[in-house]
Amino acid sequence: MRVLSILIVGAALGASAGAQTVWRCGPTGNAYSAAPCVDGRLVDVADTRGTAERQAASEVVARERRALAMLAAERRAREADAARRGLGAAGIKPLEVAAEPPPRRGKKPPRRQDFVARAY
């Protein structure tokens, strides 16, 4: 899965970074920028893959998208089934909340007296 992620990111960067200049910045080199930075190093972002490799990566992306769409459809079907049965998330029944009495009008509730301890 990690290799797939790297291929997808590489394909995206290669497609969008044709003639761009990318700088690797920061003390650990974990930040990237389109503008030069202090102690920055140029990064070669040219796509060196051949046509066959690009085609294989595109096929992997298409297969992953189809699998994702299928999983999303299954999830929506399970959620709809749970809703029909009156269940919430993870098949848990919603908490039944007792109805609160309507607020009283007119009389205010008696004011609560704070407890005061007295020593004699």
Image (cartoon, helix red, strand yellow):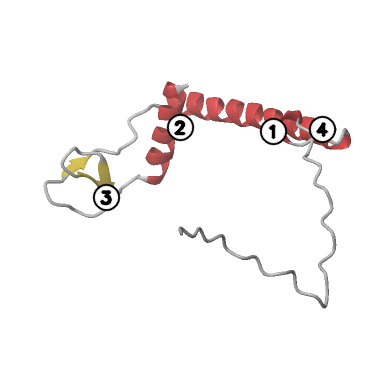
Judging depth in this view, the residue of 100 and 9 nearest the camera is 100
Q: CA distance from mark 1 to mark 2?
A: 20 Å
Amino acid type for the residue under numbered disc 2:
Ile
Residue furthest bottom in the image: 106
The numbered mark at residue 8 is 2
**Local crowd size for mark 3, using a 10 Å CA cut-off: few (<14), some (14–19), many (≥20):** some
Q: For label 4, count other residues whose C-alpha is less than 10 Å away and answer few (under 14), some (14-19) or many (20+).
A: some
Q: Nearer the viewer, residue 96 or 69?
A: 96
Foreground tag (1 vs 2): 1
Q: Amino acid at mark 3?
A: Ser
Pick whichever, 87 or 30, lies toward us.
Answer: 87
Quadrant of residue 50 within the rendered picture: top left
Q: Which residue is mark 3?
A: 33
Query: Whole-Å distance between the Cαs marked 1 and 4?
Result: 15 Å
The image shows residue 88, relative to residue 18, as above or below, that is: above
Question: Which residue was labeled with disc 1?
Answer: 72
Mark 3, mark 1: which one is toward the viewer?
1
Could you tell me residue 56's position as x and y percent?
50, 23
Residue to which mark 4 is pinned: 82
Instruction: Name the residue at the right extreme.
Output: 84
